[in-house]
Amino acid sequence: MIKAKPAPRTATTPPSPPQRESPDNPAPTGAEATHAQPTITQEQNKRPLPVMEKYARPMTEKEKASRSWQLALRRLKQGQTEDALGLLQQTIEHDSGHISAREALASIYINRGQLVEAEGILNTGLKTHPKASPLARLSARLMMNQNNNAQAISTLKSAMPEISSDPSYHALLAAALAQHGETRQAADLYQRLLGIHPNHPEWWLGLALTQDTLGNNTQALAAYGQALTKPDLGHRVRDYVKQRIKALDPAKDVSPKPGNIQPVALQ
């Protein structure tokens, strides 16, 4: 009986170590490259991925002032004056040159009768912003109420806008001039104002009073008559105007026809 011989054993070839890329051993390309997988060690696999953190940019003082101002406007609209007052104070703390906030804050103080506080807010603003006409207007009104017309005139003139852009500002100046005895200048200014808005009853009355004071009876009568044609003239003022017309010329009806309204010429 013949025994079968065992099959010869084949030698097991150990895996060759990975070869580095060199001119003689280039990196795999094409289809070979698609099968190439990067080697990730266990330690690398445990490392956390980097996190991109976002940091909010701090608000500037101007931005803080703008935010407080917008909140203050909302509170004022809602009638929450006390909250608005605090927000307005914050606004000027962040931005001392915020004219609108100073004007609103001073107005609240004036309405409350806190005139010292109002004067402080206005004076501080005018020191750094002497051309701020809204602050000058409020400050001058306070001065006129205290019969300090000379200072009111100076304050108004220091920040005076163009008459066409803010005629009511110039009307306040005309009133201060008249109260201070500078009647001719006041009359001239009322005349200029009526050239811009000829249907304003208070300005016709201002012109009539100044012309009356100057002794220009003809011009005063004409201006009084123009004032009477304005429906917005108050009843007490209307009665006073009629009395002045009767005193200046009892026999003459100087009331002009409505629609024929022109500023009278000064002499």
Image (cartoon, rainbow, N blue to C red):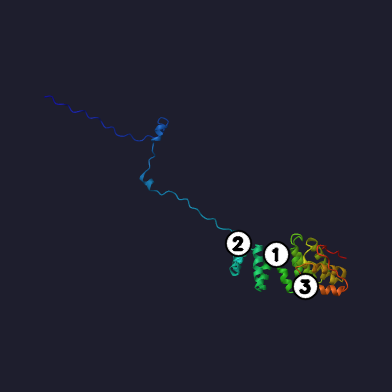
The residue located at (75%, 69%) in the rendering is 152
Pick whichever, 42 or 72, lies toward us.
72
Type of the residue with mark 3: Val
Q: Which mark is residue 134?
A: 1
Which residue lies under the disc numbered 2?
70
Seen in the image, is 101 located left or right of residue 156?
Answer: left
Q: Quadrant of residue 179?
A: bottom right
* Disc 2: CA contacts within 10 A as few (<14), some (14-19) or many (>=20): some
Going from N to C along the chain, the mark reached first, 3 or 1, is: 1
Going from N to C along the chain, the mark reached first, 2 or 3, is: 2
The image position of residue 253, as x and y in percent, is 86, 70
In what element is the residue under mark 2? Answer: helix
Residue 134 appears in the picture as rendered: yes
Q: Which mark is residue 237?
A: 3
Residue 182 appears in the picture as rendered: no
Q: Quadrant of residue 242?
A: bottom right
Seen in the image, is 16 located left or right of residue 205?
Answer: left
Q: Are marks 2 and 1 in contact (CB under 8 Å)?
A: no
In what element is the residue under mark 3? Answer: helix
The image position of residue 6, as x and y in percent, is 18, 28
Q: Are marks 3 and 1 in contact (CB under 8 Å)?
A: no
Going from N to C along the chain, the mark reached first, 2 or 1, is: 2
Type of the residue with mark 2: Gln
The residue located at (77%, 69%) in the rendering is 175
The residue located at (66%, 69%) in the rendering is 107
